[in-house]
Amino acid sequence: MSEEKTEEIIETLETEEKPKDSDIPNKYLPIGSVVTLKNAIKSLMIIGYCPVTNNNELFDYCGVLVPEGLLESDKFIVFNHNVVEKLHFLGLQNEEQKKWENTVEEMAKNAINNSYTQENTSNNQNIEN
């Protein structure tokens, strides 16, 4: 096979099989999507949405390292959409996923509102005491 033909095949594989950075949707990638975060070496697979940490911090996603997966039942990596640098694989997109995306957005809004309300309530209690 000629060198030109080999380069053409490689170029085709690179452009057709991998999503481009510009292909990253605005928010809430499907479960199973594989991403690399800014300044990260390893990739992550998204396994959940809207995790809240012990410090009541809300994140967009939780994920696990690729290829290792979940190594300990309580060890997830949490991160926000704005730190996704590269999309390697877009998870399953079907009608159920599209409906769920709207639910996730509502969950996030409610979690933020509940957190804000709880903070204000505790701040008011502290001020009154």
Image (spheres, rainbow, N blue to C red):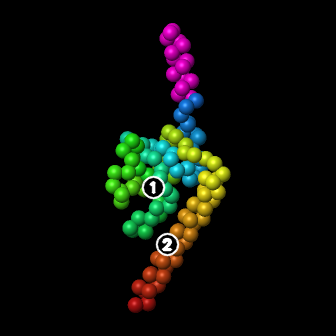
Residue at image point 38% right, 67% down = 54
Q: Name the residue under label 1.
A: 62
Q: In the rendered image of this protein, does residue 77 appear above or below residue 120? A: above
- The foreground one among 105 and 31 is 31
Quarter of the image for residue 105 reads bottom right
Q: Which of marks 2 and 1 is in front?
A: 1
Residue at image point 47% right, 52% down = 47
- Which residues make up the magenta segment? 1-15
Q: Name the residue under label 2.
A: 115
2 or 1: tag closer to the N-terminus: 1
Residue 96: percent from left, percent from top: 63, 54
Q: In the rendered image of this protein, does residue 77 appear above or below residue 68? A: below
The numbered mark at residue 5 is none
Residue 17: percent from left, percent from top: 55, 31
Identified by mark 1, the residue type is Cys
Q: Is residue 34 magenta?
A: no
Quarter of the image for residue 57 reads bottom left
Residue at image point 57% right, 52% down = 27
| Other-residue count near label 1 (Cα within 10 Å), few / some / many at <14 / 14–19 / ≥20 | many
- Kind of element beneath mark 1: strand
For the C terminus, which image quadrant? Answer: bottom left
- The answer to whether residue 21 shows anywhere in this view is yes
Q: In the rendered image of this protein, does residue 36 appear above or below residue 116? A: above
- The answer to whether residue 85 shows anywhere in this view is no
